């Protein structure tokens, strides 16, 4: 596998995780406290909840946030010893931004 592909795979895996997390059902404080075991529902599907459906704009915002996070982290890595890591973070951000900008973007 080429090095460029490894960068893309890394960026896309992390971003897919972020998109998955963004679609998670928000949990209120009452749910965090829990219910007594005797009062909790039982049976198949009782713990299932419909995920939040992200709009295209929401998904774009998540991808842009992931790219911005990588660029910010790369900017903070100023020591010469971290130059390779900073370059990788910038490359990952470029991969994500290319998806947003379309196939003809450079």
Image (cartoon, grey):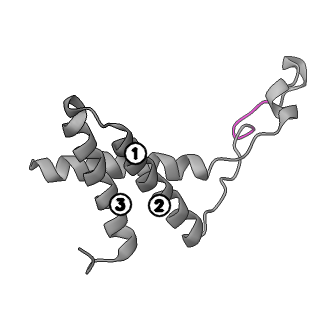
Is 38 drawn above or below residue 68 in the view shown? Answer: above
Q: Which residues are magenta?
A: 42-46
Q: Are discs 2 and 3 less than 8 Å apart at CB?
A: yes
Depth check, front residue: 54 or 75? 75
Within 10 angstroms of label 2, few (less than 14), some, or many (20 or more) residues? Answer: some
Q: Quadrant of residue 106?
A: bottom left
Residue 10 position within the rendered picture, expressed as x and y whole percent measured from the top left: 29, 45
3 displayed left or right of 49: left
Q: Residues under labels 2 and 1: Cα distance? A: 13 Å
Percent position of residue 30, x then y? 88, 33
Q: Is residue 57 magenta?
A: no
Please tell me whether residue 86 is drawn above or below residue 29 in the rendered image.
below
In this rendering, the label closer to the viewer, 3 or 1: 3
Q: Earlier in the sequence, mark 2 or mark 1?
A: 1
Relative side of 80 to 18, left or right:
left
Q: Which residue is mark 1?
A: 14
Q: Position of residue 36 (x, y in %)?
A: 88, 19
Disc 3 residue crowd, few under 14, some 14–19, many 20+, Cα 10 Å: many
Q: Which residue occupies 90% across, 24% down?
A: 39
Residue on which the image places disc 3: 96
Spatial CA distance of label 2 from label 3 is 8 Å
Residue hosting label 2: 64
Q: Nearer the viewer, residue 27 or 81?
A: 81
Element under disc 2: helix
Give the secondary structure at mark 3: helix
Where in the figure is residue 46, as x and y percent of width and height? 75, 38
């Amino acid at each position: 596998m080429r090095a460029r592909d490894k960068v893309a795979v890394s960026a896309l895996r992390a971003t897919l995780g972020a998109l998955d997390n963004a679609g998670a059902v928000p949990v209120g404080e009452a749910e965090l406290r829990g219910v007594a075991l005797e009062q909790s529902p039982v049976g198949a599907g009782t713990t299932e909840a419909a995920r939040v459906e992200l709009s295209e704009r929401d998904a774009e915002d998540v991808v842009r946030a992931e790219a911005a996070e990588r660029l910010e982290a790369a900017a903070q890595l100023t020591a010469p010893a971290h130059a390779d890591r900073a370059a990788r973070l910038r490359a990952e951000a470029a991969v994500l931004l290319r998806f947003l900008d379309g196939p003809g973007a450079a």
